Image: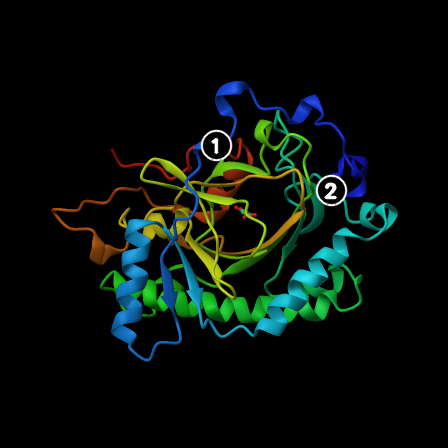
Amino acid sequence: MAEHLLSTAVHDTLPGSYVRPEPERPRLAEVVTGARIPVVDLGSPDRGAVVAAVGDACRSHGFFQVVNHGIHAALVAAVMAAGRGFFRLPPEEKAKLYSDDPARKIRLSTSFNVRKETVHNWRDYLRLHCHPLDEFLPDWPSNPPDFKETMGTYCKEVRELGFRLYAAISESLGLEASYMKEALGEQEQHMAVNFYPPCPEPELTYGLPAHTDPNALTILLMDPDVAGLQVLHAGQWVAVNPQPGALIINIGDQLQALSNGQYRSVWHRAVVNSDRERMSVASFLCPCNHVVLGPARKLVTEDTPAVYRNYTYDKYYAKFWSRNLDQEHCLELFR
Ligand code: AKG
């Protein structure tokens, strides 16, 4: 129900339904700060160097930042402003879009899956299907007034950026540049505008608990000056502090499968803080629902047998939403 939204009220105490059991808490004091996840300069004229840097980052971290990515800083700023403007709308206006049904293609919701979960997360989110854009745009929020145009333009540019990244990722695996894009079929695209209000007891809860992304590739835009995203690297949680103007890229479960496990869909989480609200905009490129997915043939050899069974994304995605966010991915192992 819409009254569950966190963004409609100021909170002085953390309700019990958000409190994680002691062993599951974020242990913020143990998080590695000041480390940098790899940076890839997409503006470099040296294609070989870009492909090598993407491959290295996918192997070592599963996460990287891209700079000189071609999406204009003014558009990025407008996207953040439109998102914030949306969450500042009066409660009655936001209530019109509220739904806790994961099957709804346009919805404002809270936590992750309030129908299933036992402990909630300190997050509201606006989830939008984005492709084909003309099909969904009419039902997107019409407030703030520039929301549709700004977010629509951003979605198209992000999609193109994603396709450029697929080419570099394919090449870095020794595949044709077109491989990933073709293997994933006519792709769906979703967007989550995540809003994390200040939280009275951030050490007891999460904005989003540790998870891997079920889609193929995620392009994340976030407040550069409010920390919150953390990635699991070498057994430790590492805080991500993006360079100004950078976008964060991560490999999702589908690229883990297509790469036959060479690239990992890495665990990440969002923590909250007591002083400042935080916003992020996650763009998810997803496979076509019905194409058969599985390890690329060229990557399956006698020495590197197929790690995953073939499957279709519609079944995969249904399984993803039927469980808790912080469970192991649902790729089925051969062994
Ligand atoms: C997601 O939307 O799946 C995220 O992981 C968002 C992380 C963030 O807000 O930094």
Marks 2 and 1, how far apart in space?
35 Å
Left or right: where 280 falls relative to 7: left
Residue lying farthest left? Answer: 302
Q: Residues within 10 Å of mark 2 (few under 14, many from 20)?
A: some
Residue displayed at 70% across by 65% down: 137
Residue displayed at 47% across by 38% down: 211
The disc at residue 99 is: 2
Mark 2 and 1 residues: CB-CB less than 8 Å, in contact? no
Location of residue 12 in the rendering, given as x and y in whole percent from the top left corner: 76, 31
Q: Secondary structure at mark 1?
A: helix
Compared with 24, 287 (above or below) is below
Compared with 224, 6 (above or below) is above
Q: Residue 112 lies in what quarter of the image? A: top right
Q: Residues within 10 Å of mark 1 (few under 14, many from 20)?
A: few
Residue displayed at 44% across by 37% down: 31
Compared with 56, 309 (above or below) is above
Q: Residue 80 lies in what quarter of the image? A: bottom right
The disc at residue 87 is: none
The disc at residue 29 is: 1
Location of residue 255 in the rendering, given as x and y in whole percent from the top left corner: 37, 52
Left or right: where 87 falls relative to 261: right
Q: Residue 123 lies in what quarter of the image? A: top right
For the N terminus, the quadrant is: top right
Q: Please, what is the three-letter code of the amino acid marked with disc 1?
A: Ala
Residue displayed at 51% across by 31% down: 26
Q: Is residue 194 visible?
A: no
Location of residue 106 in the rendering, given as x and y in whole percent from the top left corner: 69, 52
Label 1 residue near ligand 1, CB within 8 Å: no
Compared with 280, 335 (above or below) is above
Q: Please, what is the three-letter code of the amino acid marked with disc 2?
A: Ser
Q: Is residue 269 visible?
A: yes
